Image (cartoon, rainbow, N blue to C red):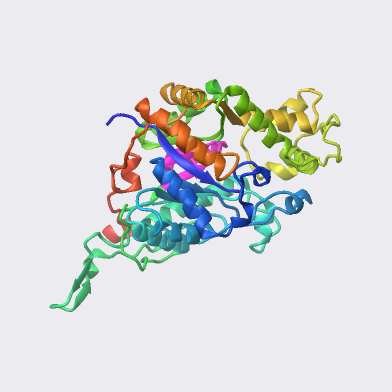
Amino acid sequence: MTRRLLLAAFLFHPGGSHVSGWRHDDAEPHRHVDIDYYADFAQTAERGIFDTLFLADGLYFWDRFTSGIDHYGQTRLEPLTLLSALAARTSRIGLAATVSTSYNEPYHVARALASLDHISRGRAAWNLVTSRYPEEARNFGGDAHLDHALRYERGREFVDVVQLLWDSWADDAILADRTSGLFADPEKLHVTDHRGDHFAVRGPLNIARPPQGHPLLFQAGGSEAGQELAAATADAVFARSLPLAEAQRFSAGLKARVVAHGRDPGDVAILPQYRPVVGETTADARAEAARILASTPDALIVEDVAHSIGQVLGPDPDAVIAVESDAAGGVAAGIANESKSPNRRLARLQAGERLTARELYAESFWESVSVGTAFEIADDIQERFETGAADGFVVQALTQPTGFREFVDQVVPELQLRGLTRRAYEESTLGERFGRARPERRVPESVLS
């Protein structure tokens, strides 16, 4: 099969992927709990023949800093509930929900995702996260997370249990035979009976095997532990946006890990975030991006940088940051258990660069966006795809709905002209669209012995 560019449509903040996207003149943040708002987004993505929606989520409200309440649009609907509603408002696009393995139980997740897969006729996907913020821990009976490595160990076992639960029933186990009176064949049902380091789950699942066998599995994480979990279990990886050469190295390294786990490198699709700003001219696009950046309040800038480097900062975004000398101590230790991904901001400060919060924030912004005409954006996407930096992208328009509509109406036709994406859906299930064969049913060894 000819390799094809994969596209996911991302939604997180009410007004777009930028924290202040809701302030844009064309944004509709007041509709952030309106099902019609989300249906319009999903239908626009489906019109662009996107492979899947991708709903980010967190189990907390960001009130660590005052700006999280004052300025940061982060209220959102629960993703599985929302995607179940969108399954009835769409027909072909995939439906990917972010679900934490740290603050859920395998049986709940297996049942909910199997239900979504049945409701959508094979379009469900799970974006696995292990959760990272103390705010989440405090909503579930603790003051701090499990250790980073332990979270990923738990995540690996969680996936295994969920997939065993999905395999509880053989595909032909449900008979519903009126004549014999047999509803199900007991020989085609197995009890999971899992007892591991983190979970004890008897099973079986009380729902028939999903149409995809196993709903598609995304995993997001750039740390060593995150990459190992993805290489062993994921069908697709949601990655950070990186400069081209770095993205190529990341992709090659992750594919090598996939091979080390006995899998084909094509078994895992790498989809970095892609934040386009499209204009009639390059200057128009850059001016629009600059306006969005300028809409970010100073308090948000300071507190975003403060959190990322694990250090309390003063209120002035233009003050040079005096970084703590010991990165492993003080406030900086507070972020060590949140993420083990490379911390470029902190590394630059520790190397002695004299930088302000505004400078660091702006540099991160410009590094994360792709700005230009539809033709230029398509050129960038094509280069990254054809040079092995990505198998596709999770498109995150800075403003919603305008920014995303511009990508679908202007960039997607250019990608289609180049033969990178299709003009119509072909496969029935999301797994097929990603080139994944339907998994064989796995029976626990305890059942076979």
Residue name at image x 60 percent, y 31 percent = 369
Q: Quadrant of residue 223?
A: top right
**How far across and down, in percent of the image, does residue 187 sit?**
22, 66
Q: Nearer the viewer, residue 103 or 447?
A: 103
Q: Tell whether position 447 is magenta.
A: no
Q: With 330 as the anchor, is 150 left or right in this view?
A: left
- Whether residue 415 is visible to the viewer of this picture, yes or no, is yes
Check the image and report above or below for 301 versus 140. above
Residue 326 location, quadrant:
top right
Query: Does the image show residue 126?
Result: no
Residue situated in front as seen by the camera: 333 or 370: 370
- Where in the figure is residue 210, as x and y percent of width and height? 33, 58
- On whether residue 220 falls in the magenta region, the answer is yes
In screen coordinates, is 447 left or right of 108? left
x, y (%) of residue 198?
52, 57
Residue 406: percent from the left, percent from the top? Answer: 51, 37
**Residues rendered magenta in the picture:** 217-239
Q: How many marks?
A: 0
Quadrant location of the N terminus in the rendered image:
top left
Tell me: 152 left or right of 432. right
* Image-based side of 447 in relation to 159, left or right: left
Please identify the residue farthest to the left as the structure is shown: 179
Taking the spot 74% from the left edge, 45% from the top edge, the residue there is 334
Q: Which image quarter is the C terminus in? A: bottom left
